[in-house]
Image: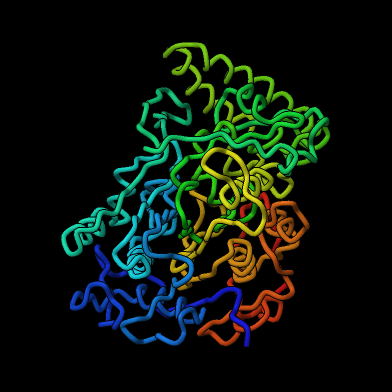
Amino acid sequence: MSAPSVSISTQSDHEYRAPPPFDPPSAFPESPFPGRLDPDNTVYTTVRDALRLLQRDAAHIDSAEWNPLDGIVRPGDTVFIKPNMIAHKHALNDDWDYVITHGSVLRAVIDYVFIALRGEGRILVGDAPQTDSHYDRIIERMGLGAIRDLYREAHDFEIQLIDLRDEHWIEKDGIYVETVKLPGDPAGSLAVDLAGKSLFTEFDGLGKTYYGAFYDTSETNEHHHDGRHEYAISRTPIEADVFINVPKLKTHKKCGLTVNLKSLVGINANKNWLPHYCIGGPEDGGDQFAPGAGVKGRLENSIVLAAKKRLLKEGSLMKIAARRLKKLGYRIFGSTEEVVRSGNWHGNDTVWRMCLDLNRILTYANPDGTLRAPGQAKRFFSIVDGIVSMEGNGPVAGTRKPTGLIVAGDNPVNVDAACARLMGFDYETLPLIARCFEEHPLPLVDVDYETLTAASNHEAWSGPLSDWPSDSLFHFKPHFGWVNRIELRR
């Protein structure tokens, strides 16, 4: 019997109950910390069960020699672990456990990486949170400091925590009023031009204007125009021997869902090099607005884009005025929580291309910016934190959805396809996933969707993904810009 493409482990308690440093609930024979137990930490067992279901190193399961990451992590490796660290809190309140990866999931992942390293190598944990997020608060809430201290004291092993951002933006009333420089990736950054291998080549010659992450659209379009599709990437994840993604299971306003593929925005070194949408509505060749925005959308752009250009040049008085004008603009044009703008809808034909470009860079880029040949891909593994997930207006303003899931696998496309199915979404309506199964000089997957299989402790999710019964799925509510577009029939 062939190994499953992914594994899905589920627990009946859809909560995180253990405090840092999230010790295991039982004396597992392979544990690097024998005697340290926390009976409340059921999440650790759920992660362990997901690894068991993949049947890696099956001959040693339930023995002290069991190494479920054997062949992925090798002694002496540098391992970069990327959790979802997007923000220190929900956009509308102080909730956080369904916004970012929980530390109890990370602790189990770190333990099994440490086992595979056999005491030789490095573990780095990092991400590039939203530029207005507070990194220290994220670390505190995730319990990463306690995990780092445990390894330092018990094994004299240093886990390095890295904020990949080089800037922190101070925001007031939705306007960025100050920029604070940060150290960024200690290894620096590199530029990678995918050129003709970028999915944006399909737009070359069409005269589109890309909007990035900030008001300066000229910078975004300087790096993305005919024949040039260039990204600034943090060097540490590229230099690492292994990349382990530990994303959160969430919906997303610009691409439907965010698991592995979308989360690689967190390895970039300049978010303004990332096209997020094309300015205008479909009638103008853009995907910023939904059809029908017409005159109102053009009027909004004429006012807002002009104001943003002035913000790049003007001082504090202009920024104070902009904060007041933004509130007025929401009253006139509608809030982003209610109106489709900024590419927050199913017609966004931009952001998924950017995400898949980033995945190809992670998979194939060398530290000097050149690209490896297919067959020489970076080693990869994923553990998805779906104990508590997010539906609705993700990735930071959605609704808490307890699901009790851990999904694991060694290919980001396979794992994301399984997650989409569990969420009750049709992968064929999600270009972020569907386009991965097409031929490309730098492939991200080497199987067809129809051949994807799962192993699970829940019988309904074992076997081919397409065979899972509808009543076993979670049927997440999409972001309002995706409603009635991506849902599987019940």
- Please give the name of the residue rendered at 52% of the width and 61% of the height, measured from the top-left corner: 380
Which image quadrant for residue 404? bottom left
Residue depicted at 45% across the width and 76% down the height: 51
The reply to whether residue 481 is visible in this rendering is: yes
As displayed, is residue 430 above or below residue 127?
below
The relative height of residue 111 versus residue 259 in the rendered view (above or below) is below
Q: How many numbered circles does the render carry? A: 0
Residue 430 is situated, as x and y percent measured from the top left of the image, at: 71, 57
Q: What residue is at 39 percent from the left and 35 percent from the top?
A: 184
Residue 224's x, y, as percent?
68, 31
Considering every residue shown, the one lying at the far left of the view is 153
Q: Position of residue 275 (x, y in %)?
A: 64, 36
Q: Observer-nearest residue: 158 or 284?
A: 158
**Quadrant position of residue 29:** bottom left
Looking at the picture, tell me which residue is in the foreground, 484 or 383: 383
Task: Indicate the colouring scheme.
Answer: rainbow
The answer to whether residue 92 is visible is no
Q: Looking at the rendering, in which quadrant would you find the N terminus?
A: bottom right
- Indicate the quadrant containing the C terminus: top left, top right, bottom left or bottom right: bottom right
Which one is nearer the viewer's eye here, 34 or 203?
34
Q: Position of residue 63 (x, y in %)?
A: 34, 86
Q: Nearer the viewer, residue 252 or 372?
A: 372
